[in-house]
Image: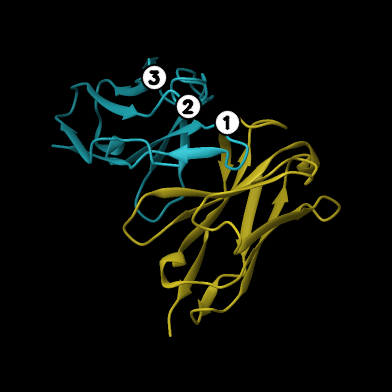
Amino acid sequence: EVQLLESGGGLVQPGGSLRLSCAASGFTFSSYAMSWVRQAPGKGLEWVSGSSASGSRSYYADSVRGRFTISRDNSKNTLYLQMNSLRAEDTAVYYCAKDYSTSWSYHDYWGQGTLVTVSS
Amino acid sequence: QSALTQPASVSGSPGQSITISCTGTSSDVGSYNLVSWYQQHPGKAPKLMIYEGSKRPSGVSNRFSGSKSGNTASLTISGLQAEDEADYYCCSYAGSSTFVYVFGTGTKVTVL
């Protein structure tokens, strides 16, 4: 059974940093692209960042490029999102999502999400 | 990197059919057969309902169907049921060198 378990969310002040983790199980983690998708309170889904299966390629939404860094440790079956220079508008539930394939197609499994609150 | 456009809300009575549109551009929806649809109930994670425009994952009811014409994709729910009341989001591969996916603005489906 595919499982994705996010952790690392919490309350952080504007300008602060936070690192999210997504522990994956039930599939060969190193064979699949992965993404982070967020949802601000009462708002829609926003794709944030994606990592190729090997981790050699990373992609970012304009809203986070230069502040967030996605990475993965395929030996630990874990995806990360390092978030720096956080802003109030980064407040959201952050979901980890598995892609269907090595390349990009669609998200077939999602974690339950971790809440990040940026506030003073 | 603009969000795909969906109607904010759609409603229907039990047993009726409804259709949700998802309008993008020739750079995303119009260029790839990689539109997916997700259902999200309050407080829950999104669930894949349609992939590659019209395919259903195992376990998803055949009351859900998808299609695409030009830059617009559509999700149709037939035989509307109370449990279909949820938010629905489309998503398209964008093929950019800097970003991968773009989501729709979301549609609240209400079963009257």
Label located before the other in sequence (2 or 3): 2
User: Gap between marks 1 and 3, in whole Å?
Assistant: 21 Å
Q: Looking at the image, which residue sits at the far right?
A: A75
Crowding at dot 3, Cα within 10 Å, few <14 / some 14-19 / many 20+, comes out as many
Residue B27 is tagged as 2
Label located before the other in sequence (2 or 1): 2
Q: Nearer the viewer, residue A30 or A52?
A: A52
Label located before the other in sequence (1 or 3): 3
In the rendered picture of this protein, how many numbered marks are placed on residues? 3
Q: What amino acid is at disc 1?
A: Gly
| Residue holding disc 3 | B66
Viewer can see residue A1: no
Task: Tell me, yes or no, whether dots 2 and 3 are on the same chain.
Answer: yes
| Residue holding disc 1 | B95
Mark 2 touching mark 1, by CB under 8 A? yes
Element carrying mark 1:
loop
Indicate the chain on which mark 2 is placed: B
Task: Tell me, yes or no, whether dots 1 and 3 are on the same chain.
Answer: yes
Element carrying mark 3:
strand
Viewer can see residue B38: yes
Residue B17 is tagged as none
Residue B68: x, y in percent?
A: 39, 16
Image quadrant holding the N terminus of chain B, namely top left
Q: What's the colour of chain B in the image?
A: cyan
Residue drawn 17% across and 34% down? B11
